[in-house]
Image: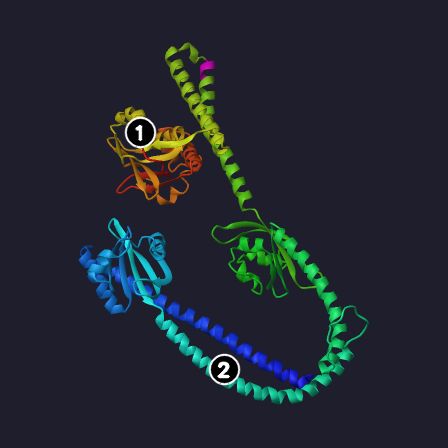
Amino acid sequence: MRLGVRGKLFFFSLILIAATGLISGVFLERSLRSWLEARIDSELVHVAKAARELVMSAPSLALPVVDDLADRSGRASGARITIVDGGGRVLGDSQLTSVKLARVENHGARPEIVAALNTGEGRARRYSTTLRTDMRYLAVRYSRGDRAGTVRAAMPLSEVDVAIRRMRLLILAAGLLGLVAALILSATASHWISGALRSLVGRAKALASGDRQGRIEHASRDELGGIAGSVNRLADELEETLSALADERGRLSAILESMSDAVVVIDGDRRITLANDAAAGLLGLNRSPVGRPLVEVVRSPRLIALVSGGAADEAELTIPGSPEREVIARAAPIKNSDGQVIVMLDVTEIRRLERVRQDFVANVSHELRTPISIIRANAETLASGAMEEPEQAGRFVEALQRQAERMGSLIGDLLDLARIESGDVGGEVEDVEVAAVLARAREELIGKAKAKGIELEISAEEGVTVRADRQALDQVLLNLVDNAIKYAPEQGRVILRSKMVESVARLEVEDNGPGIGLEHADRIFERFYRIDPGRSRELGGTGLGLAIVKHLVAQMAGEIGVEPNKPLGSVFWVTLPSGGEVA
């Protein structure tokens, strides 16, 4: 039996309504489940944190005390509270008796426990073999002195399943009522829609023109068949146009995304209509800026002046952010449009390297100018007759020697730094015992320390080893200890310390000297950077020692930094990957 337009419309309406109801039901069920589980997670967060406060304020972490805390927290919140120590042993559980608690398995491998110990909070959903139901778990980390562990709150998901079943019944009832109403409306609408379709066929034929290749296959003889004949001709032309536009857009997209420069297109209202990935990265955007005003995305008066025509076609500007970006921006108008294309080149690294080069040349020139001036003055004095006076000639020759040694030391440090930065060190990485390295540094510099009355102490954990280049590590410690002795006051104290911090070894050199302000901590390892240039030159040194140390530590896959030492002094620290056990 051939269906007419009315029959087809009625039939397809029935299918559409049923499909819509089914899809809506599935979507609502998933949304409700997600919402309910999110609410459970929110409640579990508050419950777990409240239980953690009780644990951290408890008089002790003895098993009876902790289990009582878990029981009281569970009764007050209605959730299952489990308290686990850092090794995974269960100390208390609100739903287990003391007898069952002693037999419960170790929880150290549970995913929420592992995540909480590592990040402070962990979540999981799984079937509980203890309670025989699906559970939602949320764990938070607690720290009590040198002990750490987790507090876990859990709730069964059975209430969620009950709510979902109720919602299904409601959706089914509402869907049946809606289906009946929709069928009535569809039957009524199909009666007059068939007449409207006849009118559309005539209008579609009037809009169609020309002979087009490719046709829409439609074998029926009803009104839709007539519309198909007209749409065929319109569709062919539209397909050609869309195909050309798609090819053009594909080429444009490929070009834009392959560019390393940031490209932003704005319309006449200065709203962004297109931006490539490089632009999103340069501007630090987490989502597409398309549709937003340019002034909201890039807060730069110079860029606004550039697109407004109040500046040249090119401008160098700074884009705020973390870190700031130095950019050269160019703007060009789009033909037959009020829009513009903005191309931005990130020159941050280029400008930084230029400043480094300028600073390096200035610093080296400054460091060499003083000894060269002294050498020249002493040489002129000797040449003008001071050679005839042995006492004065000796002083001038000693001055020449000191300044020559100073220049040699500076040039040597520059060569060392260049070799280290180029990776041409050739050291062998091996397991190095830290205590032995500290002992060698102390033995090397004990004489210098005694000359100032400084106590040079070692506080090293036994068995601590690191993966390092032995010679490079010796150079790092000798430099740090030598600096500490230089800046420590007479009758002061310098401590060499080593210890394990989690999976890395930490080496410290502590002094009670004048200390280093926090504003200098980030720059102290730059070449030629001095906090007090006058005092630094008085104590000797080239200003390159800490820069060499930083590069050596970096090549050994370590980190270096400085912290204030209370009440006075500084603590220079180095962290390196730990090695194997000492034989």
Q: Which callout, 1 or 2, points to the residue nearer the camera? A: 2
Q: Out of 258 and 204, give the one closest to the viewer.
A: 204
Q: Which residue is mark 2?
A: 175
In space, the residues marked 1 and 2 are separated at their CA atoms by 80 Å
Say which residue appears at 73% left-offset and 85% top-offset. 199
Q: How far across and down, in percent of the image, does residue 4 sit?
A: 69, 85
* Circle 1: residue type: Ala
Q: Quadrant of residue 239?
A: bottom right
**Which range of residues does the magenta coloring cover?**
380-384
Quadrant in which the N terminus appears? bottom right
Q: How far across and down, in percent of the image, does residue 429 sit?
A: 42, 32
Any part of residue 58 in sight? no
**Relative horizontal placement of residue 344, taking residue 173 as reference (left or right):** right
* Circle 2: residue type: Gly
Judged from the image, the secondary structure of the residue bearing numbered disc 1 is helix
Q: Quadrant of residue 465?
A: top left
Judged from the image, the secondary structure of the residue bearing numbered disc 2 is helix
Q: Which residue is mark 1?
A: 436
